[in-house]
Amino acid sequence: MTPNELIKQLLISYNNADKEAFLSIAREYIDREKRKNHTQVVKELERALFAKNGNEISFSERRFKNDVPIPRDSEKGFPLLEIRNYEESYENLIISDDLKSQIDQIIREFKDADILATYNLSYKKRILLCGKPGTGKTYTAQIISSLLNLPLVYIRFDSIISSYLGETATNLRKVFDYIEQGTWIVLFDEFDIIGKNRDDIHEHGEIKRVVNNFLQMMDNFGGNSLLFAATNHQYLLDPAIWRRFDDVLFYDLPDEITRSKLIERFLKPLKSEHDIFFGDIAKNSEGLSPSDIKMIVIEAMKLSIIDSRDNLTQNDLLISLNKFLNREKLRKTNNRKD
């Protein structure tokens, strides 16, 4: 049927209160738009079609609509990926303004993919997330998953790497075949495991072939998803891999102002005294990641809760901070001895 005929049949089925016919025709119309690569139109139509009483159906209700089985490792039978669903607020992502601007552009390009296509341009599809652990790389993918109302496909490379190296390339192929069949936010975590420099004399020749296979799969990826790769060790990546990414987001350790904002944000679940001065805590937490600061605040909240106090105090935060710093000092001393 032509688009006009589809719309006509859609209205007829609506007037006849034929829900099954209405859904069938609506899905056919959406499939036509998919074949035209009208990504944003498809997302908006699906969002409208699967709305319930004016509210979008929750991820948990929609996650099982995909009837394609999750790929598994042939050797051990383990799943090669997980499908996760998030409902996070963008305000919870406390990072530098420059980094947030990059993320904003990635989101806007994805939403306006159809407009860019009219100029023969493509949205940023492959993004590298790099920086120290606990600085917000994985959380960024979760936030974008929530903002775009798309499930997150989480892939850890330690699940893809097989004891039979020839099987690793097969696992990668299974993953790419799967993600090409839908629109997702895809996160390849611990990316440096597979992305190590092919010229490294310590690497087995088979791993170099796996890297080459991965590069080819990245180049030939034809899906409508956003692909993110996260690494804590970007200096280990092969130069050829850097060229495959449309954008690179670098997550630095937070400065003093950002650390103060993080402390205030993490303290929101618990009432605190009005005279808490975040500046002292922020100043003395130099070199810590957002993940470290969250751990410190949680420890402080526990001190207040188990003492049956109504308010969290400045002293709770100081005790928790010193405890964490002493632990880090001990860890670094042990590492030097090793």
Image: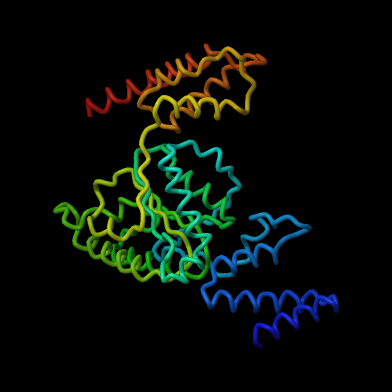
- Which quadrant holds the C terminus? top left
Residue 51 picture quarter: bottom right
* Residue in view at x 39 percent, y 63 percent: 75
Determine whether, in the image, residue 148 is placed left or right of residue 101.
right
User: Which x, y percent locates residue 200?
Assistant: 17, 53
- Which quadrant holds the N terminus? bottom right
Residue situated furthest bottom in the rendering: 1
Determine whether, in the image, residue 258 is placed left or right of residue 308.
left
Q: Nearer the viewer, residue 119 or 301?
A: 119
- In the displayed structure, 178 sits above or below 1; it is above
User: Which x, y percent locates residue 312?
Assistant: 60, 17
Residue situated furthest left in the rendering: 201
By what rule are the colours in the image chosen?
A: rainbow
User: Which x, y percent locates residue 123?
Assistant: 44, 62
Determine whether, in the image, residue 277 is placed left or right of residue 60.
left
Query: Number of callouts in the render?
Result: 0
User: Which x, y percent locates residue 127?
Assistant: 39, 55
Q: Nearer the viewer, residue 179 or 285?
A: 285
Residue 125 picture quarter: bottom left
Residue situated furthest right in the rendering: 16
* Residue in view at x 27 percent, y 62 percent: 211
- In the displayed structure, 220 sits above or below 159; it is below
Q: Nearer the viewer, residue 217 or 106?
A: 106
* Residue in view at x 52 percent, y 15 percent: 277
* Residue in view at x 44 percent, y 55 percent: 155
